[in-house]
Amino acid sequence: MEVLELTVPPEGAGERLDKWISTQVEGVSRSAAQKFCEEGLVEAAGKALSKNYKLRGGEALCLTIPDPVELDVTPEDIPLDIVYEDASLLVVNKPKGMVVHPAYGNLNHTLVNALLYHCKGQLSGINGVIRPGIVHRIDKDTSGLLVVAKDDQAHSSLAAQIKEHSFDRFYHAVVYGNLKEDSGTVHQPIGRHPTDRKKMAVTDKNSRDAVTHFEVVERYQGFTHVRLKLETGRTHQIRVHMAYIGHPVAGDPVYGPRKVISSLEGQCLHAKTISFLHPKTGELLSFDSPLPGYFTRFLSTLKRR
């Protein structure tokens, strides 16, 4: 289990406890926050709080999140866009809007549910029952390629390649503004945002090294189409790094401008290309995913300007 200590800021006064928790803790929905309260897992000064408790501001909350390994994840017959598959692994082209793995309060309709059905349970167990086979992740509203391991040996090999930076991952994005350079590197540590636990940020506190390389594909009025290479794989890395240099990803509701481009339904970010050595044969495998419809339609709109 995970124990979190949260301090309610003055501006949180008057808000319901369950709602406030759902906005502050990544991966915790409001229904999950309500369940935590009902089970006595949210306390202040040693006293359990009800879900409808009205915050006063300044409370020091203690939230205990149960170990997710106890959750029962069921296979679901959800169509998958499988780019490649063999006895050791498969490469999936994930659509925008699909969550990669279940979390407390969000157990169904994820990529893992679909994989359990498709692979009949034959997935690596290194990451536990919640994330079987998942070697690396992409955000819910990021589309594109990711590799899934069917056994622990394949998983270990692929994870080692990512750690050694020999597993190549290239993304395409449309970002706000006109980048000054045609290419460059953002090398800044990323950790949890100091006041908003649902966000990540460039910070020196409890952070990890993060490196993102970028190059301009095409420039438009007010926007730039870029190609990005991940050297590391931190949570929200591209979104955080691009926002940090003043060019947030278009459509990003978390790190972008308050006025979101709603037609994109999330960030305009696509995991386009991955390359790695096959964990069993040593063969170099490379896969490319065409830019999806939401991405090309947005580019067409920018070109018409």
Image (cartoon, helix red, strand yellow):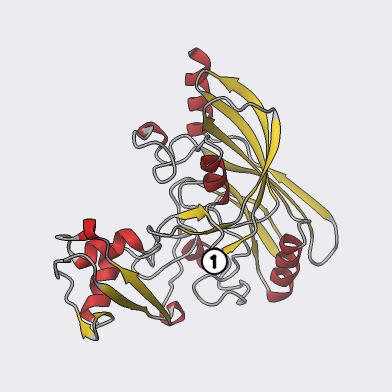
Q: Position of residue 53 (x, y in %)?
A: 14, 70
The residue most toward the bottom is: 46
Q: Nearer the viewer, residue 172 or 87?
A: 172
Q: List x then y, in percent, for residue 51.
A: 18, 71
Q: Could you say whether the residue bearing mark 1 is in a helix, strand or loop? A: loop
Q: Is residue 53 left or right of residue 198?
A: left
Extreme right residue here?
282
Task: Name the residue beneath numbered marker 1.
Answer: 206
The vertical placement of 179 against 248, above or below, is above
Residue 72 in which image quadrant: bottom left
- Could you tell me residue 47's position as x and y percent? 20, 84
Mark 1 Cα-neighbour bin, 10 Å: few <14, some 14–19, many ≥20: few
Kind of residue at disc 1: Asn
Q: Is residue 73 above or below residue 174?
A: below
Q: Tell me the residue at 46%/80% (across/down).
A: 69
Whether residue 117 appears in this view of the structure is yes
Q: Residue at x 22, y 56 (%)?
A: 11
The quarter in which the N terminus is drawn is bottom left
Relative side of 250 to 19, left or right: right
Say which residue appears at 54% left-offset and 36% top-offset: 292
Q: Residue 227 location in percent, x, y?
A: 65, 36
Q: Is residue 226 above or below residue 289?
A: above
User: For residue 77, what is the image quadrant?
Assistant: bottom left
- The answer to whether any part of residue 143 appears in the image is no
From this viewpoint, which residue is outermost toward the top? 305
In this view, the residue in front, 191 or 88, is 191
